[in-house]
Image (spheres, rainbow, N blue to C red):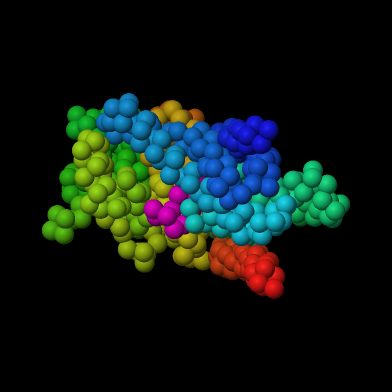
Amino acid sequence: MQRNINIFLGLLSVFSGILFTLAFAPFNFPYLAPLALSLLFAAWQNANPKQALLRGYLFGLGSFGLGVSWVYISIHDFGGSSPLIAASLTLLFVGFWALFPALASYLSVKIQPLNINNRSYLEMPVVWILVEYLRGKLILNGFPWLQSAYSQLDTPLAGYIPLVGGYGTGLLVALTASGLLAIVQKSRFRYFLMFALLSIWGVGSYLQSISWTQTIGEPIKVSLLQGNLSQDQKWRPENMLNTLRWYQSMTEAHWDSAIIVWPETSIPAYLSDVNDWFLRPLNKAAEEHNTSIIVSLPIKNTELNEKYNAVMTLGKETGSYKKTHLLPFGEYLPWQPISGLILNNLGMRLGLFTEGSIDQPLLKAAGYPVITTICYEDAFDELVLNQLSSAAFLINVTNDGWFGRSIEPYQHLQIARMRALETGRYLLRATNTGATAIVDPKGKILSQIPLFEATALTDRITPMQGLTPYARLGEKPVLIFLMILFLILLLPNSLFSYLAKNGSEN
């Protein structure tokens, strides 16, 4: 009988992991996130640490197995690996990140006294979010994919994001899950919990009506270009001139825009190879038309043997930004020299870049300072918040062509929307194959280009000033609060162990 129960709870864990991923883009069933976590938390109850570890891992396999399956496309289609190697590495990738739900499950059970049947309804959400923080910030340069808060951008809980950011909002998702579980299990506090959950969601709905930042200046006409060049064609030398001609002609067709943004590495050549004959004439034309052009290309320093993934502004105000937060196994190799030897033997082709300085001056476009991020950097709020007080809007350039016709571009846009909502700024997001979009300060998509279309997106944005509470205070208050709760939750276990030990001695 117990074996059948364990099998059922294992299958329930996998199922709840799949449900959790369905809460995110492009599926967009956000209310499944607290439901999925409720099922997972239920599977932890009355489990020993080993059982909880397995159930958490199965949840992770279900969630990441669906949610990051696009890794296969990157490794096989564009990394040059065989189907077997690509599938093996994808499974390894999924299996590694599944360790974190397993860790949350294990810790949640381990820190409670063994003879207590029902685990703390508060403890499970706290441990869940602390482990999300560990995964999102500290391991392998951070992997914040499929974090709880991102699923809630279109629910009342989004109202909390400008106040407490992603991890604070994620805690509310997990608390909702735990509260629902307690209500179903007829906790003696169930009526209080019903009122508390209704209050949390009701207040969130009200908070969505508050504008934390203010407009400055007049609306600005902007154009974002989406070249839609397949990743396997992009860097072929015979395609470079046609690529540059397309972007140049599309730019010339939109000289009436104050800002024109090209996607990540839209120029498939080093700066030194195209500066004299292409960029300088384009810069002169931008000056004459009073337009700021944001272009992206790699920059090479031959003397220092350094390569940078970079963005440049052309026009009256020129400048450059070099990517600071590099993608592990894509732009740099951690765990050297082992990782390098393995990937070289597998025949995978990777670009190795150098980190840019963290104190680079802000670029300017149409006379306004802007926060600029490249691709994966938009998943890390600290890169956006550091100089936000001086910035009027956000620009992100991305190349999600690495992931083909998968769910990844939709997930990535969802993550980018969080940055707009956290900061109360418009976001201009230009991508190679999609999803190119303009996002308003409420995190809503103002306009968007369909994926895999070569075209331009033109709209108007308004420069903003001021700071949201989260932009002003950052994540430290939330982390301190979580750590205090975690330490409090440790006390009953320590006290119980002490009493049990002394009781047995007596």
Residue 506 at x, y percent in the picture: 69, 73
Residue 3 at x, y percent in the picture: 63, 34
Q: Main secondary structure of the magenta part?
A: loop
Residue 30 at x, y percent in the picture: 65, 39
| Span highlighted in magenta in the image | 136-146
Q: Residue at x 16, y 59 (%)?
A: 304
Task: Specify the quadrant of the image occupied by residue 321.
Answer: bottom left
The magenta stretch spans residue 141? yes
Q: Residue at x 36, y 64 (%)?
A: 358
Q: Residue at x 31, y 31 (%)?
A: 85
Q: Residue 63, can we see it?
A: no
The magenta stretch spans residue 161? no
Left or right of 324 on screen, residue 467: right
* Foreground pick, 74 / 230: 74
Q: Residue 375, can we see it?
A: yes
* Foreground pick, 470 / 97: 97
Task: Specify the quadrant of the image occupied by residue 499.
Answer: bottom right
For residue 90, above or below residue 38: above
Quadrant of the image for the N terminus? top right
Residue 18 at x, y percent in the picture: 58, 34
